[in-house]
Amino acid sequence: MRTMPWNVLIIVALLLSACGQDASTSTTASSEGGGLESCLNGVQTGLDCYAKAEVRRLANSQQMTGATGDKTELQIGSVALGQTTDAEFRITNTANLTSAAALRIDDIKFSYTPTNPQETSVVALSCWDSTGTVPCSEKKGMWKKLAPVGGATPSGLFAQETFKIRYTQFDTKVRTAKVCMVMGGDKDFAKKNLCFQVVTTAGKPKISVQPPQVDFPYVKLGSEATGTFAVLNGGESTLYLSKFELNLDSSFAVDIAGKSLKGGTALPAFDPPLAIAPGSTLGGVVHFKPVDDKKRAGEIKIFSNDLTIVGGLPILVTANTKVPCIQVTPSPVVNFGAVKVGSTVPQNITVANCGSEKLTLSNIGLNAGARDAYTVDFGTLGKPTAAAPWVLAVNDSKEFKVTYMPPALADAPDLGSLDFESNASPVALKLTGVCVAETCPVALVTVQEGEQVVPQTVLHLKGSASYAPGGGSVSKYVWTVAKQPEGYKQTFVPGANFPDPTFTTNAAGTYEFCLDVYDNQSPPKKSCGDPVCVEVLVIPSEALHAELLWKTPADSDETNQGQGVGADMDLHLAHPLAQGQDLDCDGEPDPWFNQPFDCFWFNPMPKWGSASTTDDDAHLDLDDTDGAGPENINLDVPQGTVSEPLQYSVGVHYWNDHGFGKSYATVRIYVLGNLKVEYKDQEMSPVDMWYVGKINWPNDAIGGTDAVFKPCLQTGNQCLALKDPKDPKGGKMWSDTGTACIRPCYLSPLGSADAAMCSTK
């Protein structure tokens, strides 16, 4: 049996006997044979003898007046099914000692009507004596007679009497009972019923979680870390957890109440729900096993019977928020070029901390190649070891030297490597050089921003460290782009013959930049062998990255800039709530050109989600109006969850061709930096609207069950089919097979698209 704290009840009963007189005519007790002994013994000496009953609920000592509507609430929210709890009441006689009669308890009547079919031999509310073993109904005439408080207790009288109201949990429905105490004074005192109600209340649960965020500052690839949290019930009734929703990728898992839940998977509800008593907690464990060293963020949503929390109580989960980062320059290859036998060519190597935490470098291992052609000089720094590592603060760097000295002529380049071991991800730097009989100028290439960047990064390519042996100088630089994403066209600024040009990487993908140099001899001698190249990987950092490129055959120069010098196409990413005109005749509102739920050039930064953050809002980061693209729209934290998935619509509108005619659009969609969807060279005419399809979030690329993308395919023009079912060009959208969903003459409500083009169709 579990005892609950109870609200206080006070029942005050004034039981009067004036020995034939009303209390209003009472007089002061005389000293002749009167006082306490006379009243208690029933000796009538002209005294007004009376008893005064006071009823209190123990544990909180609240008093009750006995007025109409008097009641006490029993908090039963923490009582589990089948369990019981008792509320104890104490009756005392608080009459004045000089004129107090004994208080007689003739009966305690208890009225309750069961409401649950299971209430048979045991009911939800019942009344018991002080021992909790004898029902009140069996105590009639057997209750104690009470002397006044504060005086001596004569034989046959008692200082107090107690009884109990017992609650047994059948369900959480409200129960009501009535308690009536029939009490009187000694001998012929009038009886008086003093009644009150007992009403059960379940109270309310109150959920909270500590800590509100589980953070894994840095976990190395191949390692695993755990973090803990606790769910607390600060309310008066039992808190029931119905389910956990893990809006996390598959590198996370959660253990709770003996269950292991994997991030990114569909989660069943808890059956039965997890119960937390008032004042108690339930602990959980979050596991994180990274697949890379990129930042991760998500949340755990806890659903419960706390109705003040709408949509689940979130626990923010973050990982690799303070990742140490190592940057080696030059990278990923140090090309020493062509070197004569017996000559030495040094190259400075810089190691920098590019992260947000200190970098601890424990080893730099040299593989000098088969011919032992490379040496390392650490100077006064000394070689880093586990016992004496190099420790670099944020943005700090250290420099050492690698020298190439070929021992003899060879038919193949000398290859070597440097391996960097630290608390960051491992880095390997390739070394290459060739031994020649006659020296040539040497091209050296570095990229200031490193070998991996995000889209729209302006790369600063460095070739000015190239040199000509023997006292000569470099007179000419020739840069080429050996590789860039298909459909993307960009040039060096200010030009391909500048020693240190820039190059803008607006499109995601792989780029390779190569350099040849010439010396100042007559005629100029070109650098020996193949050009020196460096590869740069451009990867989006957002969870969702949509990209549009296009090519227009009639545009002879798609890289020139200016109003009207190229075709203008627009990328659209629409929230599920977007509703526009139904111009494709599918019976549903189109998402295009809706504000605020369609992100495009006129609505580049819509407000979609929480008022306190922009992470769940799409943003158009690149808009191209004069040909080729790219355009890209990004979303850091999509709103869809496992229990409530969303679909974001992707579309392309041919806004204005500026007289160049047809174009061919390519759409790419990246999830967590990985290319997942690509549709290439879709033919589009001016004022066409291409409904590319819908992105499912979450999806199987982040541990979900749905495919990343549902393409829109049609068997013909749906509008024509509605007008005339026999029209051979008619059809329907969202078919399993067919052609791309393109609606001709999709005029924007903004009114600046080339409507004249539609008159010819």
Image (tube, rainbow, N blue to C red):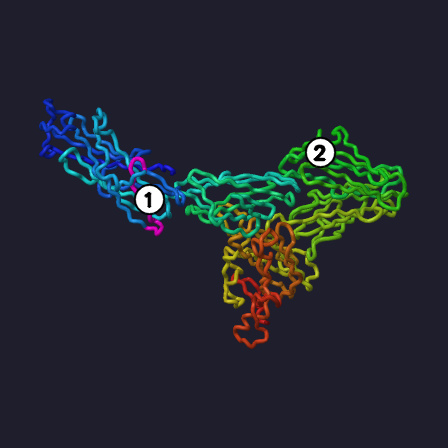
Type of residue at label 1? Answer: Thr
Which sits in the foreground, 246 or 10?
10
Query: Which image quadrant for residue 693?
Result: bottom right
The spot of residue 315 in percent (x, y) is 51, 43
The spot of residue 536 in percent (x, y) is 71, 47
Which residue in the protein does label 1 denote?
A: 200
Q: Residues within 10 Å of mark 2 (few under 14, many from 20)?
A: some
Which sits in the foreground, 698 or 147?
147
Is mark 2 in CB contact (under 8 Å) with mark 1?
Answer: no
Quadrant including the N terminus:
top left
Query: Which image quadrant for residue 399?
Result: top right
Which residue in the protein does label 2 denote?
A: 362
Give the residues in magenta. Answer: 115-132
Type of residue at label 2? Answer: Ser
In percent of the image, x 52 and y 57: which residue is there? 576
Give the prevailing secondary structure in the magenta stretch. Answer: loop
Q: CA distance from mark 2 to mark 1?
A: 68 Å
Judge whether residue 565 can be spotted in this image.
no
